[in-house]
Image (tube, rainbow, N blue to C red):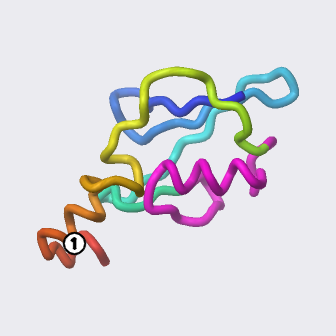
Amino acid sequence: MYLIRAGRGGRDPVVSLVANEEVQHFVVTTSPVHLCMKLDGGPWFVGLDEMIRHYSHRSHGLPVALREPCMGDSIPQALLAAGPDTPLHLATRNNDLNAIR
């Protein structure tokens, strides 16, 4: 079981999961313009939805794969890869090449 929550002080999101009857927390590192994110030692993803999809198929450094989400609030649209108003979509729509690089 896992959940994704805001970090302390509204900073980078945190993945909290249960493995071996123990709760563990992993900070999601975001790029300065919040276009990409990753867990320590893992690959970069465009949004939390892509990251969750990846880690639901394999653990890739986590103690377990992300299989069963806890019910809670929706992930904020700005942290998702899919959807019309993600940071990447906004940057490309506004020709913000610095944010895309």
Q: Is residue 66 magenta?
A: no
Name the residue furthest right: 20
The N terminus is located in which quarter?
Answer: top right
From the top left corner, tell me how far across and down residue 67 is, in percent: 73, 38
From the top left corner, tell me how far across and down residue 52 is, in percent: 60, 48
Q: Which residue position is annotated with label 1?
A: 92
Name the residue furthest left: 94
Q: Residues within 10 Å of mark 1 (few under 14, many from 20)?
A: few
From the top left corner, tell me how far across and down residue 37 is, in percent: 47, 56
Lateral position of residue 10 relative to residue 49, left or right: left
Give the magenta-colored segment's residue range. Answer: 39-64
Is residue 19 depicted above or below 91 in this figure?
above
At x 84%, y 21%, the residue is: 21
At x 49%, y 49%, the residue is: 48
Q: Nearer the viewer, residue 70 or 9?
A: 70
Amino acid bearing label 1? Thr
Is residue 95 depicted above or below 69 in this figure?
below
At x 59%, y 29%, the residue is: 3
Q: Is residue 48 magenta?
A: yes
Among the 4 quarters of the image, the one containing residue 38:
bottom right
